[in-house]
Image (spheres, rainbow, N blue to C red):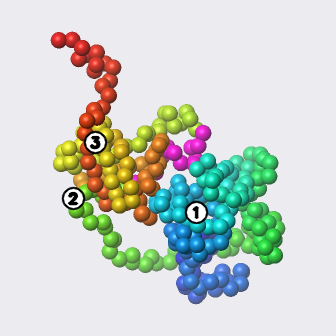
Amino acid sequence: LRAGVHPGLLPGGRRVADPAERAEVEAAWGPVPAEPGRDARAILEAAARRELDVLFLVGVDPLRDHPDAALARRALQNVRVKVLVDARLDPALEPFVDCVLPAAPFLEKDGHYTDWEGRGQRLRPVRDPIGLARPDWEIFAGLAVACGEDLGFETLDELRAEAGPLLAPRPAPPLDDPGPVERPARGDGLVLFTYPLLVDEGRLVDDAQELTRALGDEAFLEVHPEDAARLGLGDGRPARVRTAEGVAELPVRVSDGVAPGAAFVPFTAPGFAANVLLSGAFRAEATVEPIRGEEPAAAPEDAAAGGGG
């Protein structure tokens, strides 16, 4: 947000649609579009409609990250050229990608990170990039030259000199009133919602087997005791959750940590991706039913205790 990587923002959090704030950036960059750009979903929708010839995937895997797996797959199938800029190529994404530009991971490049509170932290490389990998800014500068253009800098110091004044702290503009929140109709089902757990199948814990074994969770469906009783769901027993987009079979967790009328699934877990149940939002209307005829496996001590009599 601070860097302006948002369809409605420019560097420093300046609003694209505000002429005065846009003029501050134009003083350094020259003319910029006055209309907001596309967000991630709009980009994928344009790709799915074959309105884009080339799709750059910069540190993102829409098959894994976007909350609509079907849309992500259509987008990748319908764009003629897909270019991935990343430190690694995910096996699931490999069949769709035409070109990979290897980017240096964070341990191999100089730069800054900004946390959610706006604090900037300097990052210095612990080693040089391996092979043909380059820092992201070098990749984009090289692409610009290949296209016959010039981004206006050739070194990271030149980039910082240009970006520093644009990213300097400034008073935050007043927030627009978003209006009433549209909530899905419940009917007889549950409002399914999801978010990533701290340790899951996400990219930042790839190959961290010990961490995953210690803190990782298998896929599950969490419901409130009232809903479990109403729907005939048992703790640890399998259930079928169905949305307009898809269906999944998951073991149930009965917990008062989730509100009545809601159900939670982790966004990614071993063998499960919640985006197959979603259509662009991280929530959906769902029906849940028990899968009959399957009982949870008894623990060894329970089996031993039941062997007498």
Could you say whether the residue bearing mark 3 is in a helix, strand or loop? loop
Q: Is residue 196 left or right of residue 292?
A: right
The image shows residue 218, relative to residue 109, as above or below, that is: above
| Magenta part of the chain | 194-207
Q: State whether residue 200 appears in this view.
A: yes
Q: Position of residue 20 (x, y in %)?
A: 59, 87
Q: What's the distance in space between the residues labelled 3 and 1, CA to CA?
A: 35 Å
Q: First in sequence: mark 2 or mark 3?
A: 2
The residue at which mark 3 appears reads as: 291
The residue at which mark 1 appears reads as: 77
Q: Position of residue 90 (x, y in %)?
A: 62, 49
| Residue for point 31% across, 57% down | 286
Q: Residues within 10 Å of mark 3 (few under 14, many from 20)?
A: some
The residue at which mark 2 appears reads as: 188
Question: Which image quadrant is residue 164 in?
Answer: bottom right
| Residue for point 68% across, 62% down | 83
Could you say whether the residue bearing mark 1 is in a helix, strand or loop? helix
Amino acid type at image mark 1: Gln
Question: Which image quadrant is residue 235 in?
Answer: top left
Could you say whether the residue bearing mark 2 is in a helix, strand or loop? loop
The image shows residue 72, relative to residue 203, as above or below, that is: below
